[in-house]
Amino acid sequence: EPEVTQTPSHQVTQMGQEVILRCVPISNHLYFYWYRQILGQKVEFLVSFYNNEISEKSEIFDDQFSVERPDGSNFTLKIRSTKLEDSAMYFCASNGADNEQFFGPGTRLTVL
Amino acid sequence: TQLLEQSPQFLSIQEGENLTVYCNSSSVFSSLQWYRQEPGEGPVLLVTVVTGGEVKKLKRLTFQFGDARKDSSLHITAAQPGDTGLYLCAGVRPIPTFGRGTSLIVHP
């Protein structure tokens, strides 16, 4: 069964460092998303991506964040200068035209 | 900010009992999705409801979308321990807004 994969599963970084979280969406999907979930809190939408550009983004997705689809398979989220409050689970998701959204297993980001 | 309120926040029941969890908002959504999330994993989509008043069934789970497309309910019949998990609703408009979830524990 096709699935969304994410790497790494856990990333530990120092405050102020750049991190890149990687995702491989399901191969025939066209819509890609990043969400975050701070421990004990709700899942929050960050950004959606379609046709090689951002289609929607939330207030959380400020200038410190960027997304890229560098090739035909990867979808990345970059945080330029991490802050303590960026510590969270980051989920990638993708869907095809039927809007059935599949989530990846998440990357746990810990900022020290 | 669109708020999606889920209730109850926690539910602990015995195997075989029925239960209903609710998802309420003051906003109208183009669609509403229900997910289940296990600890340390990503949410898994259970169902999407689109039309006001729509009812969808998935084995022992019944999902209903309110007539005004502002609220939804999930009813589980004869709950089993395997139903244990965090149930999330997400309103789509088109940015998905998630509720905090209902944490369900079904005791054998």
Image (cartoon, coloured by chain):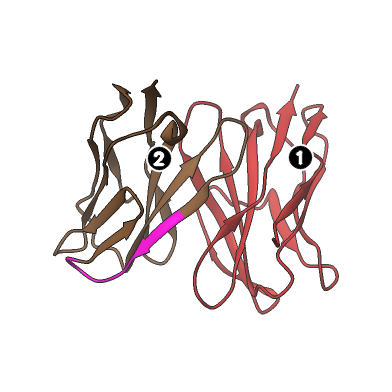
Chain colours: A red, B brown
* Residue sitting at x 28%, y 54%: B63
- Residue, x 76% and y 39% (percent of image)? A81
Residue B25 place in picture, x, y as percent: 23, 49
Q: Nearer the viewer, residue B50 or A15?
A: B50
Which of the numbered marks, if any, corresponds to residue A81? Answer: 1
Q: Amino acid at mark 1?
A: Ser
The structure residue drawn at horizontal position 46% and vertical position 43%, both measured from the top left corner, is: B36
- SS assignment at label 2: strand
- The residue beneath circle 2 is B87
Q: Is residue B48 magenta?
A: yes
> Relative to A40, is A105 on the left or the right?
right
Chain letter belonging to callout 2:
B
| Highlighted range, magenta | B46-53
Question: Badge 2: how crowded within 10 Å, few (<14), some, or many (20+)?
Answer: many
Q: Secondary structure at mark 1?
A: loop
Q: Can you tell which quarter of the image residue B49 is in?
A: bottom left
Q: Position of residue A47 (x, y in %)?
A: 58, 58
